[in-house]
Image (tube, grey):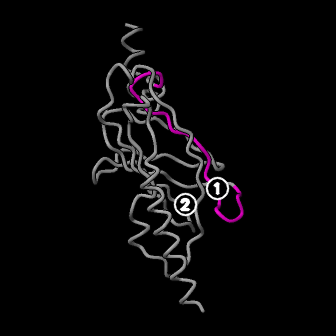
Amino acid sequence: MIRSLAIVLLFLVGQRTIAQSEQLSDVLSIFGSVRDYDSKRAIREGIIYVSIGDSIVSTYSIKQGKYSFTLPLGSEYKLCYIAPGYFKKIFIFDLRNIPPTESKNGFEICLDLSLKTEFQGFSQEILDMPCSKCAYNIESRDIEFDKVYIAERHALYDAEMERLKKIKR
C-alpha cells in the first residue's frame, strides 16, 4: 500500500521529477547561463519554450541567468529562449536515431548563450529561423552542433547588421 502511494505521488509531482529520475538514461540534460550580449550581465528572467512540431510540450524558467532541464531522447525539439526586451533565440535538437546502446548513460550539453537587446528594423524572418541545430553523430557517438549551419546563420546575422548600419548613415 505504501509503495503504491509513493508511485502515485511520484506521478502526481510532475514531469520535472520524472525527468530528473531519468537523467542517467535516455535523456539529454541541457543547462547553462543566459547573458546580455553587450553587457555580459546575467539575464535575470525569461522562458524557454520546448516544442515538438508546432506544439509546445514544456516551458522552463530562466532564473538568475541560469536554467536546467532534460529532454527525453527520440524526438526533434525546437527550443525558443525568450526574455523581455531581447531578441529570441531558437535552437533545434534532433534527438532521433540514437542507438539504444548509446543512450543508456544519457547526454549532457552546457549551452551558455547571450541575447541581444531588441531594436527596430531587424528582419523578423532571420529571428524566426533557428540560430543553431544539433543532432547525434554516429562517428563521435555524441550530440554535436552543426558548425556549417551555425556559420551560415552568423553570416546572415552579420549581413543584416550591415544592412541596418547602411540605413542609419
Instruction: State the count of labels.
Output: 2
Secondary structure of residue under mark 2: loop
Q: Residue at x 47, y 30 (%)?
A: 107
Q: Which image quarter holds the C terminus?
A: bottom right
Q: Which residues are magenta?
A: 23-41
Q: Residue at x 59, y 66 (%)?
A: 116
Where in the figure is residue 53, as x and y percent of width and height? 27, 50
Q: Residue at x 60, y 57 (%)?
A: 114
Where in the figure is residue 75, as x and y percent of width and height? 31, 39
Residue 20 on the magenta segment: no
Image quarter for residue 137?
A: top left
Question: Position of 119 compared to 48: left or right?
Answer: right
**Mark 1 residue crowding within 10 angstroms, few (<14) / some (14–19) / many (20+):** some
**Mark 2 residue crowding within 10 angstroms, few (<14) / some (14–19) / many (20+):** many
Q: Which residue is denoted by mark 1 in the rendering?
A: 35
Where in the figure is residue 153, as x and y percent of width and height? 45, 62
- Above or below residue 116? Residue 112 is above
Q: CA distance from mark 1 to mark 2?
A: 10 Å
Q: Which residue is denoted by mark 2 in the rendering?
A: 83
